[in-house]
Amino acid sequence: MDSFFINGYVPRDTFIHRLHPTTKLLIFLLFVILVFVPIGFVFQSVIFVFATVIFFVAKLPGRFYLSSIKSISLLFLLLLFVNWFTFRDPGFYITADQVNTVKPHFNGNNFNFWNISLFNYQDNVFSQVFNFNRANMTELNKINFFFKETANANAYTKVTGIDKLAEMLASKNLFKFNGSTNGIDKNKILGAFLDHKIAVYLGRSWGGDFSGFVIDVSVSDKTSTFTIKPFLANSNYVLTLRAIILAFYVTQKILIMIILATVLTSTSSSVELAYGIERLLWPLKLLRVPVNVFAMTIAIAIRFVPSLLLESQRILNAQASRGLDFKNGNFFVKMRSLSSLVVPMISIAFRNAGELASAMEARGYDPTKKRTTYRKFKIDWVDATALILTALYFVVIIFLTVKGAVFLDLGTPEWLLTGKIKEQVERSLSVKSA
């Protein structure tokens, strides 16, 4: 029973245990590919839920699952600390079905406003100024957790977190210009912006304050285009919701890998793993690659990991009973203490390898000879159904990712953008401007 708690093979009578070994390996590889593809937070969460459901459908001990979560908790804290100081910008969050970006252009004497479909986001700021009516404002305010403040130049929009924002905007002291205005009066530009209904939605942050607006100026031969976006005054300790979710996003990838690997190794014996790997690598036999040797080596290596973990725990307990302290002391003291663990572990690993080699020789194992299998595995309708459903899910997710799909019901923050969203937006902008 002790081996159960180190993710060894757990015999159960479930359909996952009865799946063909090759089927389980193929499904595992497909989901591993999806984890490493930038499919976005929503799609990845779906995979996480699926992996969790499969784990408990296989009737594996809940301690395995809790152990997996505990093992990456430190990694989450480390990633959160890194993102805390590298992602100061809170990002934007949109829930409208269609967003129109305000892009005014100056034709000589007057400003004309024209709207662009989809949305435009800034690589550096990840927050945007949008053109909404009051109905859209009400709709957007339903999810308030992600918003820090909602501001509008005409001041009829609900404002939270900033006092007297309308007066501050009207004073025109919160606007900065990037680039040359090409001789156009700045007051005329500001007046055109203030007369228009513009609203800014900033992602929630702690320690960062809204400072004003930046107007990017793009000058061409015929027109001058101005894009307005907010800028923030961030302190050294600012923490954004985007930083938290980015840390969770990366940690979730590793947790999915651990859960899927646990399901694979806990529902497949060594013989099944070797059989599945050998069948999966069968095409390499045409190139005279010793597939059976690779398959047996990989299967033995997978099975050695739980055994070594069990041995390491026994050595730690034995050394602790002799008074050796692995927890207290400075870094160098702990490193010296670890030598009493590493040396026996290496010795045990070589001893187990020698015993296994002797046992295989005694049973007449010869990797260069053709071998039969004691147990025959057949693919039935359950295996075919599982493979087809997994393949369909894989194709759909990859297709939506390439197409740049986002879930507007959950908003379109920058960390949810996938695929070629930026190229689509830029292409839309070029079409509109033409």
Image (tube, rainbow, N blue to C red):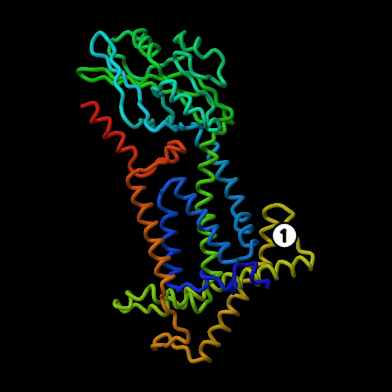
61 with respect to 16 (left or right): right
Other residues around mark 1 within 10 Å, as few (<14) / some (14–19) / many (≥20): some
Which residue is depicted at the point 53% across and 69% down? 265
Q: In what quadrant of the picture does the C terminus appear?
A: top left
Closest to the observer: 399 or 91? 399
> What residue do we see at 44% from left, 23% from top?
135
Q: Which quadrant holds residue 130?
A: top left
Could you say where residue 273 lies in the image, as x and y percent from the top left? 48, 74
Camera-side residue: 355 or 32?
32
Q: Which residue is mark 1?
A: 326
**What residue type is disc 1 on?**
Phe
Q: Position of residue 119 (x, y in %)?
A: 36, 31
Which residue is pictured at 45% across the width and 64% down the height?
Answer: 28
x and y percentages locating residue 304 in the rendered image: 56, 73
Say if 371 sits above or below 315 in the image.
below
Name the residue: 44% across, 59% down: 32
- Say above or below: 177 vs 326: above
Q: Under tag 1, what secondary structure?
A: loop
Q: On the picture, is 109 further left or further right than 264?
A: left
Locate the N terminus and report the quarter of the image it occupies.
bottom right
The location of residue 84, given as percent across then percent down, is 55, 37
Closer to us: 21 or 213: 21
How many numbered callouts?
A: 1
Q: Quadrant of residue 345?
A: bottom right
